[in-house]
Image: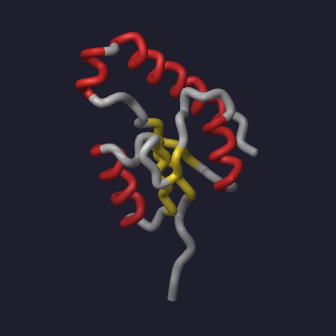
């Protein structure tokens, strides 16, 4: 008998090392965890206005978001300002969307 998932959860940066581990752990705990990342499986650039909102609307019924999207360490060293923008813009857009569920 299959049980209903405990929560529908989105993990930005879900294709990365930490995000991938979190998605797997959440799934083992019975949650329906979806990885959102530039590399997929659900592709989204969280710095693009409206992109994250569209993903959440498409998934429907998301109850929690873990925002782990960020540049890889090598990119941060080479391009500090764009890396900061990714973190700040992504965090703001994810937070605003989470604060206003559909």
Q: Is residue 61 above or below residue 4?
A: above
The colouring scheme, among rainbow, by chain, secondary structure or one colour, is secondary structure
Quarter of image, res 93: top right
19 relative position to 59: left or right: left
- Residue at the (34%, 51%) spot, across then down: 20
Q: Nearer the viewer, residue 83 or 19?
A: 83
Q: Is residue 30 left or right of residue 76?
A: right
Q: Check the image and report above or below for 88 versus 28.
A: above
Residue 78 point in image, percent of width and height: 27, 15
Q: Residue furthest top?
A: 81
Q: How many marks?
A: 0
Give percent across and percent down for residue 77.
25, 16
In the rendered view, would you say 20 is above or below 51? below
Left or right: 71 as drawn, with respect to 31: left
Residue 53 location, quadrant: top right
Q: Quadrant of residue 61?
A: bottom right
Task: Look at 41% across and 41% down and name the residue there.
Answer: 13
Residue at the farthest bottom position: 1
Q: Position of residue 18 (x, y in %)?
A: 30, 44
């Amino acid at each position: 008998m299959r049980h209903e998932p405990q929560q529908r959860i989105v993990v930005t940066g879900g294709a990365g090392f930490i995000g991938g581990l979190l998605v797997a752990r959440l799934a083992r705990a019975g949650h329906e965890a979806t990885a959102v990342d530039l590399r997929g499986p659900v592709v989204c650039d969280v710095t693009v206005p409206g992109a994250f909102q569209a993903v959440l609307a498409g998934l429907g019924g998301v109850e929690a978001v873990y925002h782990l999207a960020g540049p890889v360490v090598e990119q941060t060293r080479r391009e500090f300002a764009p890396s900061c923008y990714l973190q700040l813009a992504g965090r703001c857009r994810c937070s605003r969307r989470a604060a206003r569920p559909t």
